[in-house]
Structures are given as C-alpha cells and as structure tokens.
C-alpha cells in the first residue's frame, strides 16, 4: 500500500506541475490579451478558442486532480509518512475544481453567450482574471504540498 502511495504521489505531483504550468501560461498570455481586445473581437475569438481551451483544460484538470485526491486517501489509509502533505495537495486540488463550479462554469457560459456589453465584458474579464489567479495560487500551493510529500523519507 505504501508503494502505491509513493507512485500516486509521484504521478499526481507531475500532473499538478503540468496543470499549474498550463494555468500560469493561460494567465500570463491569454488573459492580458483578452482584456486588451475590443468586445466584438474578443467574442469572435472566444467562439473559436473557448471550446478548444475547455477541451484542453477539462481533461488536464481531471488528470491533475483525481490522482491528488486518490493519493491523499491511499496515503492516509497506508499511514504513509507523506500523508499530511498528500492530504493538503488533495484538498487544494479539489478546491480548484470547486472554484470551477462556483465561478468559472457560469462565467464561461456567459462569455460564450456573447450577451455582455463592452463594459460588462471588461468587468467580467477582470473578475475572471482575479479568480483565475486565485486558482493559480491554490494550484501552486497544491503542487508545493505534493512536492513536500515526495520528500518524506521512511526509516
């Protein structure tokens, strides 16, 4: 059971790193660009790239979150030395998914509907950006906890 925990921690740490890296790139590259566009240009691009971003991030989110949650459970059951960092990583990873359902799902649907005025779009993209960076901070903390879990040594 401890070997399974080790493997899950290793895999989940890698996936969390990949996921957080993708979120950082999205925040650093796309959000700044989106916020600078006129509303009609943003909506035209969002119609094309919104679904593509979803198809990229949805499986990546699951692939990063599920192993972290499973690692937390398995490591706790195995009384593994890395169980506490794994638990923190699992909870923080799950909270990133919760944020999607609390904010991003509705916001993304609103953007896809192209029903916002230019002023409303600017406000919504500012909120989207703030929530995105909060999610990135959670992801970095989850990744850090997962890395800490990998550094536990058994005697």
Image (spheres, rainbow, N blue to C red):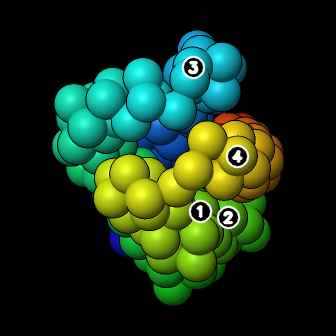
Dividing the picture into quadrants, the one containing residue 98 is: bottom right
Q: Are marks 1 and 3 in contact (CB under 8 Å)?
A: no
Q: CA distance from mark 4 to mark 2?
A: 33 Å
Sequence-wise, the earlier of marks 3 and 4 is 3
The answer to whether 107 appears left or right of 123 in the picture is left
Residue with the mark numbered 4: 119
Q: Are marks 1 and 4 in contact (CB under 8 Å)?
A: no
Residue with the mark numbered 1: 96
Q: Secondary structure at mark 4?
A: helix
Residue with the mark numbered 3: 37
Dividing the picture into quadrants, the one containing residue 46 is: top left
Where 75 falls versus 35 (above or below)? below
Q: Are marks 4 and 2 in contact (CB under 8 Å)?
A: no
Q: Secondary structure at mark 2?
A: helix
Sequence-wise, the earlier of marks 2 and 3 is 3
Q: CA distance from mark 1 to mark 4?
A: 28 Å
Q: Nearer the viewer, mark 1 or mark 4?
A: 4
Q: CA distance from mark 2 to mark 1?
A: 6 Å
Q: Is residue 73 visible?
A: yes
Q: Are marks 2 and 1 in contact (CB under 8 Å)?
A: yes
The answer to whether 137 appears left or right of 39 in the picture is right
Sequence-wise, the earlier of marks 4 and 2 is 2
Q: Are marks 3 and 4 in contact (CB under 8 Å)?
A: no
Sequence-wise, the earlier of marks 1 and 3 is 3
Q: Nearer the viewer, mark 3 or mark 4?
A: 4
Circle number at residue 121: none
Residue with the mark numbered 2: 92
Assign the N terminus to one quadrant of the image: bottom left
């Amino acid at each position: 059971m401890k070997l399974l925990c080790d493997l899950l921690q290793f895999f989940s740490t890698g996936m969390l790193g990949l996921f957080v890296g993708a979120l950082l790139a999205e925040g650093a590259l796309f959000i700044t660009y989106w916020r600078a566009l006129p509303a009609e240009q943003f909506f035209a691009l969002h119609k094309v790239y919104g679904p593509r971003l979803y198809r990229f991030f949805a499986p990546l989110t699951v692939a990063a979150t599920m192993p972290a949650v499973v690692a937390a459970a398995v490591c706790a059951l195995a009384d593994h030395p890395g169980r506490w960092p794994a638990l923190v990583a699992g909870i923080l990873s799950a909270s990133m998914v919760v944020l999607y359902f609390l904010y991003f799902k509705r916001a993304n649907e609103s953007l896809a509907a192209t029903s916002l005025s230019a002023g409303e779009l600017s406000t919504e993209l500012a909120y989207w950006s703030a929530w995105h960076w909060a999610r990135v901070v959670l992801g970095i903390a989850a990744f850090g906890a997962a890395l800490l879990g990998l550094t536990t040594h058994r005697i």
